[in-house]
Image: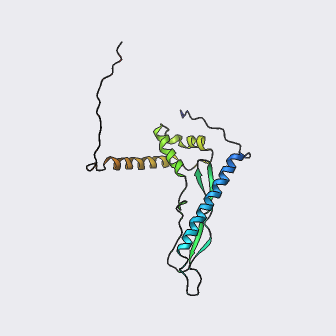
């Protein structure tokens, strides 16, 4: 039996959509598309002078990768990343800095996970907590995933504790005292 104190925020019915929410997602989708297109234009300009023997460009645009979704604070946003073809065979590939190949969640969602952990949400309740905060689109965070992330945070903390402070100078105050609430 779960002793969860989480209260789910009411989400609109699957058939009904929130117009403002949909407008925000559409705006985010369009903005991401324009930003990735600008990245691609810059990338193609770098290789504009690289041509084949017959005068054609060696690096050209070649459609899109399959559409995928990215979890954001406003829900899942569908994204399409352009594909580039290298006709010269040099192995030139385009990788968006905005949408790396395996990005599944926005950084704000990634930062939410440790915050929930620090607030005492158990690993088994993450799915329910994220669904309450982000809606039904919050998927893909099983207890195993959270446990793996927790292990990664512990490793990072251990590395942080072992860092060398020999060349650093810190000023600190030490206060010691006893507080007693005797009647």
Residue at 55% across, 55% down:
104
| 59 relative to 23 in the view: left or right | left
Residue at 69% across, 50% down:
23
Provide residue 52's location: percent of width, then percent of height. Answer: 55, 84
Provide residue 39's location: percent of width, then percent of height. Answer: 56, 65
Picture quadrant where residue 85 is located: bottom right
Picture quadrant where residue 41 is located: bottom right
Q: The N terminus appears in which quarter of the rendering?
A: top right
Residue at 55% across, 82% down:
51
| 167 relative to 50 in the view: left or right | left
User: Farthest residue toward the bottom?
Assistant: 54
Residue at 29% across, 43% down:
170
Is 174 drawn above or below residue 59 in the view shown? above
Front-lying residue, 50 or 74: 50
Front-lying residue, 150 or 90: 90
Provide residue 118's location: percent of width, then percent of height. Answer: 46, 39
Front-lying residue, 6 or 182: 182
Provide residue 87's location: percent of width, then percent of height. Answer: 56, 79
User: Farthest residue toward the top?
Assistant: 183
User: Farthest residue toward the right?
Assistant: 15
Is residue 81 at all visible to an observer of this figure?
no
């Amino acid at each position: 039996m779960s002793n969860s104190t989480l209260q789910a925020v009411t989400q609109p019915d699957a058939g009904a959509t929130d117009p403002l929410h949909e407008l925000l997602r559409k705006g985010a989708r369009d903005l991401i598309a324009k930003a990735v297109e600008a990245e691609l234009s810059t990338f193609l300009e770098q290789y504009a002078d690289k041509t084949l023997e017959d005068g054609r460009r060696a690096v050209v645009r070649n459609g899109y990768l399959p559409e995928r979704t990215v979890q954001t604070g406003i829900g899942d946003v569908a994204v399409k990343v352009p594909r580039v073809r290298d006709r010269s065979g040099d192995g030139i590939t385009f990788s968006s800095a905005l949408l790396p190949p395996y990005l599944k969640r926005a950084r704000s969602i990634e930062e939410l996970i440790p915050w929930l952990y620090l607030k005492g949400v158990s690993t088994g309740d993450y799915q329910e907590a994220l669904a309450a905060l982000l809606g039904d689109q919050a998927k893909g965070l099983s207890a195993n995933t959270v446990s793996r992330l927790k292990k990664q945070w512990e490793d990072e903390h251990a590395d942080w504790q072992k860092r060398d402070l020999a060349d650093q100078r810190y000023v600190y105050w030490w206060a010691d005292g006893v507080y007693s609430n005797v009647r």
